[in-house]
């Protein structure tokens, strides 16, 4: 594989790209030990925050710290504009698609998506059939994973339409960078991200049910302290200024949701829930769930509460459905998709499967419902034995898998043991949809694969994060 | 605020207060047991400590004998005892984590630091010296947490509920000491003034950190009825029943003011406060000290129930 596109230096032999001019200059000026010192300082601050918020078992203390890289990833205003348009289009299409799947099903009748891919999909929720949701919005918060392969080409890798996480890192990374590198900030004009909680709250309030008469009451529903993202939940609730509730804090009476407060029951209008569909209401879904609220779905069906995201959005998260996204965009919006999809072979289809089996050593094979970088095969770096083992798994359950070519994710200069070196990155912008349309805070969470040559950016697999700067033109 | 949040704050304070109380009992007991038998008599101080801590039933399920080793382990380090110092700090930390955003940074640092430090003591002390250091550390941790709450919390319902926890627990603790040791304080006790009792009274005062205060208030040598007067009726003493109820009423009134309504908890607390204010030691002795204290403990528990029902469910 040829050297990947570098965010700072472009392709081999190119000039430094304009957005990185100041940073490249600064990297030349700054002594290596200062960079290293700041890196350790950042780690100390994070450890403190981490200890303050996230530690509850000894072994957890270090695991919970996601490595932070002090060299920012920078995007020019024009690049961001392109992405922003593409993301808005994509999320609009996602919302229309989910509404259609649980409503008129025009896309199925038009034969664009095979019916069984929807109806036999574990993420499909028959309970949502014919059910309207407030303002027809299903995906209020999306975390769309974007990768880049050259100056103009961005691909969507995944549409995270259920309960995407990571936004607290976007906010904290910026805070830390501003503390550690004020001089570098003064040499740039960087679009702020700190307004994300305000934008999120405005979006959530805007989708309150029509029956809400006064200022809507918003809460954040967490599975509780033992959830690995609990830190993010409490962080966000704090920034939003809303109550962080657990299932047992809520109850449903006459199809209305209330929270138990010291002043008696208080009506709840919008629930930003970070609990999966399966656990949200033991009367409707998993009966053994103690994380949910009995009867919540009845209040939802009565239109008395908004769930963000809606129940059943997982259908758009499925990697086989993903492969139809270009067609989905065209079908609902009549537009060409602005963001590309990674070419995808659906192993459920015989011809695709045959191709995949013949080219396993070149492809990335993923489970359709997998996430977190688990259960996947990266052909070019896998051993012969691993490939053969995977071949057996794939043959046994072909419809559980899709395959994609190994894309050369762009690299970005990163502070590592041997100094500053290029490492592969992706980007997760957070796309908010409210009654008045889509809002995206410029930037997102840049994840970086810290191991040399590695393409896996997931934190569970040794990935780190970077601050993401969108320059103001 | 969420009832669960209020509940967590209330119990967080109670656990920290209880840990400190246990440390004081153990400290006082250690002193008593170090005295020659001629000064303290043949009574088993370690058994008395278990009774004062209010966990005799659980203790004797696990041990046959109340000796230094068993009692120290059970009251300070045992995980089988849900009210041991260790269990209290662990429960406090757990509660704090669940309501992280309702605490100030200083409170969190204090309770989290205590919890991390607790691990250093492992499963118990290796020597009496180390155990003394441990007891001092427990008291300092409680003071630090209390101080950080007092100095940094916004004066709103979160603060009032956390204060309520402190005073409800404190009232209960003081009443328990009186309940176990009341016979030492009776004015007609025949052994009054003997050397045996003198050290017992000092131990009682020590376990509520009131030994110096006694001398300041009465300017007299230790007299049992004055000890009872100090612990029950004196507003000046921060751990007296009277002083605790002054604070309970004040905090409940703050809550009622903010919420715009009074409830059963407020009425009940005010009733008890009035009774304490109108009581005189003579009257209490005439009606029976033991009866008075037993009744107080029952009423205090009832108030706890009323607070829970009105706000925390």
Image: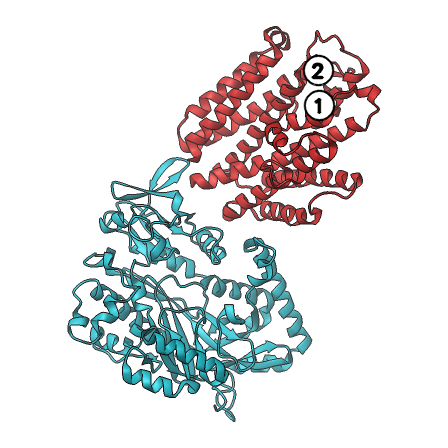
Find residue A414 and name its label: none
Residue at image coords 26%, 47%: A299
Query: B199 or A473: nearer the eye?
Result: B199
Which quarter of the figure has residue B277?
top right
Residue density around tag 1, few if under 14, some if 14–19, many if 20 or more, within 10 Å: many
- Residue B184 circle label: 2
Colour chosen for chain A = cyan
- Chain B painted colour: red
Mark 1 touches mark 2? (CB < 8 Å)? yes
Q: Quadrant of residue A111?
A: bottom left
| Residue A85 appearing in the image | no
Dot in front, 1 or 2: 2
Front position in the image: B237 or B40: B40
B313 in relation to A432, above or below: above
Q: Tell which of B22 and A394 is nearer to you.
A: A394
Q: Secondary structure at mark 2?
A: helix
Q: Is residue B218 left or right of residue A367?
A: right
* Residue that numbered label 1 is attached to: B204
**Secondary structure at numbered mark 1:** helix
The C terminus of chain A, quarter of image: bottom left
Residue A226 visible to the viewer:
yes
What is the basis of the colouring in this image? by chain
Which residue is at a point 58% across and 47% down the rendered structure image? Answer: B108
């Amino acid at each position: 594989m040829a050297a990947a596109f570098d965010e700072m230096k472009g392709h081999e032999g190119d000039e430094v790209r304009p957005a990185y001019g100041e940073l490249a200059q600064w990297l030349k000026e700054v002594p290596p030990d200062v960079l290293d010192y700041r890196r350790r300082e950042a780690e100390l601050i994070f450890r403190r925050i981490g200890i303050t918020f996230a530690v509850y078992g000894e072994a957890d203390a270090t695991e919970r710290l996601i490595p932070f890289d002090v060299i920012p990833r920078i995007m020019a205003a024009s690049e961001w504009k392109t992405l922003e348009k593409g993301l808005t289009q994509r999320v609009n299409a996602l919302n229309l698609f989910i509404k259609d799947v649980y409503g008129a099903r025009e896309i199925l009748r038009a034969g664009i998506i095979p019916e069984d891919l929807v109806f036999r999909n574990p993420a499909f929720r028959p309970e949502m059939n014919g059910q309207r949701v407030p303002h027809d919005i299903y995906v209020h918060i999306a975390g769309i994973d974007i990768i880049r392969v050259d100056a103009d080409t961005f691909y969507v890798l995944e549409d995270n339409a259920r309960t995407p996480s990571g936004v607290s890192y976007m906010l904290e990374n910026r805070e830390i960078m501003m503390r550690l590198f004020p001089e570098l900030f003064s040499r740039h004009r960087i679009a702020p991200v700190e307004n994300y909680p305000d934008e999120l709250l405005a979006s959530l309030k805007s989708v309150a049910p029509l029956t809400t008469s006064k200022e809507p009451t918003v809460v954040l529903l967490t599975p509780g302290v033992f959830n690995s993202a609990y830190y993010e939940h409490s962080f966000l609730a704090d920034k939003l200024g809303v109550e962080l509730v657990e299932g047992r804090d809520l109850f449903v009476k006459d199809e209305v949701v209330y929270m138990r407060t010291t002043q008696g029951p208080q009506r709840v209008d919008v629930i930003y829930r970070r609990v999966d569909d399966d656990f949200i209401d033991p009367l409707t879904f998993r009966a053994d769930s103690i994380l949910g609220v009995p009867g919540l779905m009845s209040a939802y069906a009565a239109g008395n509460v908004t769930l963000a995201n809606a129940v059943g959005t997982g259908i758009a998260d499925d990697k086989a459905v993903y492969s139809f996204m270009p067609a989905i965009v065209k079908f609902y919006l009549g537009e060409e998709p602005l963001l590309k999809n990674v070419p995808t072979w659906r192993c459920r289809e015989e011809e695709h499967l045959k191709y995949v089996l013949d080219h396993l050593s070149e492809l990335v094979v993923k489970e359709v419902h997998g996430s977190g970088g688990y259960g996947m095969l990266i052909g070019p770096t896998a051993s012969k034995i691993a490939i053969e083992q995977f071949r057996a798994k794939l043959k046994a359950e072909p419809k559980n898998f899709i395959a994609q070519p190994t894309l050369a994710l762009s690299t970005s200069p990163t502070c590592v043991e041997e100094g500053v070196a290029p490492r592969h990155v992706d980007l997760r912008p957070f796309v908010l949809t409210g009654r008045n349309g889509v809002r995206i805070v410029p930037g997102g969470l840049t994840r970086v694969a810290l191991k040399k040559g590695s393409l896996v950016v997931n934190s569970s697999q040794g990935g780190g994060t970077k601050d993401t700067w969108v320059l103001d033109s | 605020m969420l009832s669960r949040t209020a509940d967590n704050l209330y119990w967080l304070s109670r656990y920290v207060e209880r840990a400190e109380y246990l440390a004081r009992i153990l400290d006082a007991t250690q002193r008593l047991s170090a005295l020659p038998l001629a000064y303290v008599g043949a009574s088993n101080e370690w058994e008395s400590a278990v009774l004062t801590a209010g966990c005799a039933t659980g203790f004797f399920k696990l041990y046959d004998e109340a000796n230094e080793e068993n009692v120290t382990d059970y009251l300070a380090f045992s995980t089988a005892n849900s009210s041991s110092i260790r269990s209290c700090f662990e429960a406090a930390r757990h509660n704090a984590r669940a309501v992280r955003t309702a605490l100030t940074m200083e409170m969190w640092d204090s309770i989290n630091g205590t919890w991390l430090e607790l691990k250093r003591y492992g499963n118990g002390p290796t020597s009496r010296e180390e155990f003394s250091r441990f007891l001092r550390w427990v008291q300092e941790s409680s003071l630090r947490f209390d101080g950080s709450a007092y100095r940094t919390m916004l004066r709103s319902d979160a603060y009032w509920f956390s204060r309520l926890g402190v005073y409800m627990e404190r009232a209960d603790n003081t009443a328990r000491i009186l309940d176990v040791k009341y016979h030492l304080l009776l004015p007609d006790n025949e052994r009054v003034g003997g050397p045996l009792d003198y050290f017992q009274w000092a131990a009682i005062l020590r376990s509520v950190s009131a030994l110096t205060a006694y001398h300041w208030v009465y300017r007299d040598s230790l007299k049992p009825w004055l000890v009872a007067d100090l612990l029950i009726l004196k507003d000046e003493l921060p751990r007296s029943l009277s002083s605790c109820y002054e604070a309970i009423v004040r905090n409940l009134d703050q809550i009622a003011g903010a919420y715009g309504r009074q409830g059963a908890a407020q009425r009940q607390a005010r009733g008890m406060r009035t009774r304490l204010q109108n009581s005189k030691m003579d009257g209490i002795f005439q009606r029976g000290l033991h009866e008075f204290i037993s009744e107080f403990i029952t009423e205090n528990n009832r108030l706890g129930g009323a607070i829970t029902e009105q706000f925390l469910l």
